Image (cartoon, coloured by chain):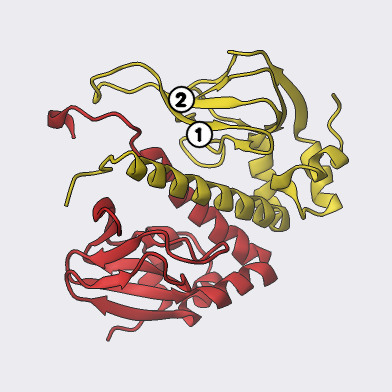
Chain colours: A red, B yellow
Amino acid sequence: MMQINTSTLADLRFFKGLPEPHLKKFVENAMSAEFRAAEFIFHEGERANCFYVVLDGGVALVSRERAQLIETIGPGDLLGWSWLFPPYFWRFSAHAVLPVKAAVFHAAPLREACENDHDFGYELMKRVAEVVVERLQATPYQLPQKPDKI
Amino acid sequence: MEIKTTTLAAQPFLKGMSERQLEVLVGDATAAEFKKDELIFNEGSPANRFYLLISGKVALESTPDERYDARDPVLIETIGPGAVLGWSWLFPPYYWHFDARALTPVQAIFFYGTRLCEQCEHDHDLGYELMKRTADVVVGRLQATRRRLFEQGKNLLFPI
């Protein structure tokens, strides 16, 4: 299994521009993980005690009750933010659509690091907020699109 | 209406901020009022501010672009007292992604976001508190939006 180190993370968009000590803090709480195609990474309703950054492959975020696709997540993307705020459970399920390599991060020590070190916390929260705002702005509203333009 | 640190301390979004942080925020805050039906900001214009709603209701609307058949504004969400209005001021490209319109007379606190961004960059204690609250609000908003679209039976991308 591959090793997660600061150079693995430094090139990824989510971590871009982070100083070395902050990257180290992420690495200290990271493991590598692999998933087979169609394997579930987490399930809706389970405790969200970690988050992922996809290194290779593709992940589908789906809603359990309707088996509907919410979004697909590819290399360099952040997967999961339910770990950041109470009540800390997954709102959706995620499964690999291709074989996936990912870095998995333990949530509790990183949340604690945010509270204890606001330089680190500012960077983490700013980056998560930015990703979430982007996803929110990319969310289509109620109207069906013209098929040829999707 | 004058905005004081006590006004800010009473806002749910700012709960737990220190007196010193509230004093910084007060320097960026002004009272704002809107008449019923008044446009607070419109999609595509530069985003350099945000609001905390004190009273009244605001509709967030989006006008569909050429990808859509219908071109009437679509209601995204209605927000009320205590809500945060706007986060496009935080990140490039700094323009509004939707219209905000007063549905009733609205009282709000206006924050000058551009200066606040700079203050956050220099003061990470303040930046952390503000970003943490913003991340919390936008995560909640995203999850609620997705949930609502599902309940309406819409596929967000395509059926699987």
**Would you name the residue on which mark 2 appears?**
B61
Label 2 and label 1: CA atoms lie apart by: 18 Å
Q: Please report, as a chain letter, where disc 1 is located.
A: B
Left or right: residue B65 versus residue A14 is left
Quadrant (top left/top right/bottom left/bottom right) for the N terminus of chain A: bottom left
The residue drawn where x is 67% and y is 49% is B120
Quadrant (top left/top right/bottom left/bottom right) for the C terminus of chain A: top left
Residue B138 placed where, x, y %? 52, 47
Q: Which of the marked residues, 2 or 1, is nearer the chain's N terminus?
A: 2
Q: Is residue A22 above or below residue A124?
A: below
Q: Is residue A19 above or below residue A3?
A: above
Residue type at numbered disc 2: Glu
2 vs 1, front mark: 2
Q: Residues within 10 Å of mark 2 (few under 14, many from 20)?
A: many
The residue drawn where x is 63% and y is 73% is A112
Left or right: residue A2 versus residue B113 is left
Q: Which mark is residue A149?
A: none
Residue type at numbered disc 1: Tyr
**Would you name the residue on which mark 1 appears?**
B94
Q: Nearer the viewer, residue A21 or B35?
A: B35
The residue drawn where x is 37% and y is 62% is A79
Q: Is residue B59 above or below residue B39?
A: below
Left or right: residue B20 versus residue B146 is right
Left or right: residue B47 versus residue A67 is right
Numbered circles on residues, count: 2
Residue A99 placed where, x, y %? 18, 71
Instruction: Report the residue that reaches farthest toward the bottom.
Output: A1
Residue A16 placed where, x, y %? 44, 60
Q: Is residue B124 above or below residue A31?
A: above
Judged from the image, the secondary structure of the residue bearing numbered disc 1 is loop
Q: Residues within 10 Å of mark 1 (few under 14, many from 20)?
A: some
